[in-house]
Image: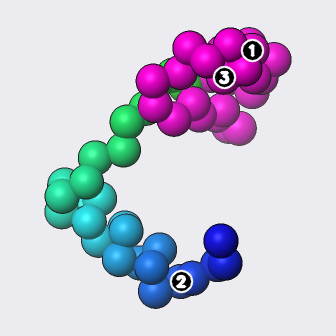
Amino acid sequence: MQPNGEQLSRIAELVEAENIIPVLDQVYDFTDFAQAIQHVDRGHSKGKVVVNLL
């Protein structure tokens, strides 16, 4: 894959219009980063796994 600002803008438009909806499986705090990695490694995720850096 190559970075493509035009495609990224189009994806953002589709998400904002709710034409595509990202699937979030789990959100982890940064302090639980190791658990997030284990969750993905074990194949348990059914969508995107997010690590909150704030």
Magenta run includes residue 49? yes
Magenta run includes residue 31? yes
Q: Residue at x 53, y 83 (%)?
A: 5
Above/below status of 17 relative to 43: below
Give the residues in magenta: 28-54
- Amino acid identity at mark 3: Val
User: What's the mark number on residue 40?
Assistant: 3
- Amino acid identity at mark 2: Gly
Q: Residue at x 37, y 36 (%)?
A: 23
In the figure, residue 20 lies in which quadrant? bottom left
Above/below status of 49 relative to 9: above
Q: Residue at x 28, y 46 (%)?
A: 21
Q: Are dots 3 and 1 in contact, CB under 8 Å?
A: yes
On the image, the x and y values in percent for residue 26 come to 51, 22
Quarter holding the C terminus?
top right
Direction from residue 50 to residue 6 in the image, left or right: left
On the image, the x and y values in percent for residue 51 come to 66, 32
Element class at badge 1: helix
- Amino acid identity at mark 1: Gln
Dot 1, crowdedness within 10 Å: few (<14), some or many (≥20)?
Answer: few
The residue carrying mark 1 is: 38
Disc 3 versus disc 1: distance between alpha carbons?
Answer: 5 Å
Which mark is first along the chain, 3 or 2?
Answer: 2
The residue carrying mark 2 is: 5
Above/below status of 1 relative to 24: below
Direction from residue 39 to residue 49 in the image, left or right: left
